[in-house]
Amino acid sequence: MIEKSVVLIKPDGVERNIIGNILSCYEDNGLKIVALKLMKATREIAEKHYSQHKGKDFYEELITFITRNPLCAVIIQGEDAVARIRSINGATSPTDAAEGTIRHRYARSKTENCVHASDTVESAKEEIALWFPEVENN
Ligand SMILES: Nc1ncnc2c1ncn2[C@@H]1O[C@H](COP(=O)(O)OP(=O)(O)O)[C@@H](O)[C@H]1O
Ligand SMILES: [Mg+2]
């Protein structure tokens, strides 16, 4: 199935000038960037995006982190894009992420782990609506 997924290169990735390196990982795997923008997430959009984590001990740190500087929001399309991108990103924590994954290579901590990716086709649709309200037929 051709799917779309939302990738966020989080503020740590933008601050460290590794947007290009990270995007190459997806493109080199045959995935297509179909929308892309730099934006500073407001607290409102960050809270909607991470609503499932509200109340967890890392939640406030996560919201502060994701809103502190611009992030790079991307829609990526391709065959089985949702699962493939999660696998290219690697496990949430850099200590668990497999060699060759983005998080193994670049993440510095559990919170500052460089990338987000949609976890299901359904959440991808919600995240496209949230981050790219201007994109039609999404
Ligand atoms: N135990 C934790 N401590 C600190 N930050 C965390 C922790 N778990 C998750 N996070 C942060 O919250 C984000 C969302 O968590 P989760 O949805 O579980 O991971 P993923 O991004 O791999 O889907 C993570 O990418 C990471 O930035
Ligand atoms: Mg998640």
Image (tube, helix red, strand yellow):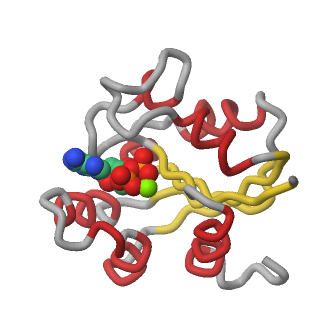
Decide: is 99 above or below 76. above
Q: Is residue 57 left or right of residue 93?
A: left
Total labels drawn: 0
The answer to which image quadrant residue 130 occupies is bottom right
Residue at the limit of the structure toward the top, as seen here: 99
Decide: is 134 above or below 68. below
The answer to which image quadrant residue 46 occupies is bottom left
Residue 99 shows up from this direction: yes
Q: How far across and down, in percent of the image, does residue 125 sit? A: 67, 73
Q: In this view, does 61 lie to the left or right of 8?
A: left
Q: Nearer the viewer, residue 47 or 67?
A: 47
**Which residue is drawn at the image coordinates 74% and 48% (left, top)?**
81
**Which residue is drawn at the image coordinates 78% and 77% (left, top)?**
138
**Which residue is drawn at the image coordinates 84% and 81% (left, top)?**
137
Decide: is 113 above or below 28. below
Q: Is residue 122 left or right of residue 64?
A: right
Q: Nearer the viewer, residue 86 or 32?
A: 86
Q: How far across and down, in percent of the image, does residue 29 sit? A: 77, 30
Q: How far across and down, in percent of the image, does residue 101 sit? A: 53, 25
Residue 11 shows up from this direction: no
Quarter of the image where ligand 2 sits: bottom left
Q: Which of 128 and 125 is in front in this view?
A: 125
Decide: is 136 above or below 92. below
Residue at the limit of the structure toward the left, as seen here: 57
**Which residue is drawn at the image coordinates 58% and 42% (left, top)?**
86
Q: How far across and down, in percent of the image, does residue 109 sit? A: 26, 35
Q: Which of 37 and 46 is in front in this view?
A: 46
